[in-house]
Image (cartoon, coloured by chain):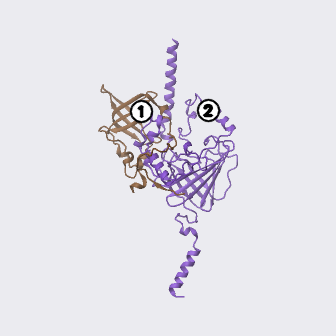
Amino acid sequence: MKYRVHLATFALCSGLLLTVAPLAAHHSFAAEFDIKRPVKLHGIVTAMDWINPHSWIHLDVKGPDGKVVSWMIEGGSPNALLRLGFTKAALPKGSEVVVEGFQAKDGSNRAVGQFVAFADGRKLFLGGSAPGAHGDGDK
Amino acid sequence: MTHLGIRAAIAAVMLWIAPAWCQSPVPRTPDGHPDLQGIWTSASVVPLERPASLKDKEFYTEQEAAENAKRVLGISSWERLGVQAREHYNMSQYGLDLSQVKVASTLRTSLIVGPDGRVPPLTPEAQKRVAERSARNRGHQFDGPENRPLQERCLIYSTEGPPMLPSAYNSNLQIVQDAGHVAILQEMIHSARIIPTDASPHLPAGVRQWMGDSRGRWDGDTLVVDTTNFTDKTAFRNSTASLHLVERFRRIDRETLIYEFTAEDPNTWVRPWTAQIAMVQIEGPIFEFACHEGNLGIANTLSGARAAEKAAEEAAKRENR
């Protein structure tokens, strides 16, 4: 039997059935967030909590009446971001971001950030484009 | 014999007497055992159970395996979440996609070995037990923290084991080894399993542990770990405290560690079953997960349930007016 390091680079092969196991997230997002409360928040970052199992971005959002409301946005585990080179300094206070997601079921100002981007549209997190994110192929 | 001839003869004798491990590509510890130390990932492009369409096909051809890997790694985790994605964050944004990490390739079509490729059926007793537990929990899943799954409470992760399985993300573990112990630290979510390899016996049967009691021994170049003394609190795919686990660790080259486990529990499955995972070495470090300290999710989940109950009560009151 032969084992070797393999790297993902190309497109899908449609001939075979989906064979990956279902994802086991840390918790049920449907239990925490409400699909009937979509939010789009344009705000200023006041802090980012680098905590597991989920990171939290703190955001001040100015409403149409000028009143500032503080929000907390749930994101992924910080460990992978650290591996991609994302550091504490990468999201400084005062950064302007746009979050699309869903509000907490208890109606508090907490939401899951499905998409988080800088105000100019750039992706907030480095995702798969970061050097070293793909194992061997980047060596 | 010429001077050159003597040197050649000495070299030939040295080669003959040299232990086989001198020529092995596998690093060794000073006591001669394979050195399993390092940071490894169990991330996998094949599922635990074989898809029904592949029937009894246990191995792909090299080309099929490459196509499968390309296809699986081409699907973002967020796409793979399916209906769960509706309220979920985009995992690729946070570097949690399978395509964003190193993955060992394999010709296997499922982690479970053998022609069946699936977890064996539950015994009638186990079916009854599972049905009763499910009936007990129905309608009470959000009563309090004790009703939530262990991993949501940051106590132990569902893939942490033993036996160890690939996780949805951060499938990373570190192995540390000395003359009498092997220790395994898994990133998800914090447990360090310390396995004596000093021929000491298992703990007395009355002492039960969530991760069982593991004892290791070397069978040639394979580390064999026998684990008993489980509780029924960490039921592995519905197993009971009588779960008996045998794990085998074999480093086949500098990059690759083959991990295999056989799970046996006559109170749960009709027969023992075996799975094999190819792990590949990655660069460190392992990061602390410290999940409990930052677990705002469980509080939000429970407060969400309380808010839903209150809303339902108010709706019922309105209807009764």
Palette colour of chain B: purple
Palette colour of chain A: brown
Q: Residue at x 52, y 61 (%)?
A: B253
In the figure, A103 relative to B120: above or below? above
**Residue B8: where, in percent of width, then height?**
52, 81
**Residue B43: where, in percent of width, then height?**
50, 49
Q: Residue at x 56, y 66 (%)?
A: B30
Residue at the far bottom in the pictured view: B1
Q: Which residue is mark 2?
A: B134
Residue type beneath disc 2? Ser
**Residue A139: where, in percent of width, then height?**
39, 57
Q: Which mark is residue B63?
A: none
In the figure, B307 relative to B121: above or below? above
Q: Which mark is residue A111?
A: 1
User: On the rendered image, what quadrant is the N terminus of chain B found in?
Assistant: bottom right
User: Does the image show residue B62?
Assistant: yes
The chain letter for the residue carrying disc 1 is A
Label 1, label 2: how many angstroms apart (C-alpha)? 30 Å
- In which image quadrant can residue B201 be found? bottom right
Given residues B55 and B248, the one toward you in this image is B55
- In which image quadrant can residue B145 be found? top right
Given residues B210 and B269, the one toward you in this image is B269
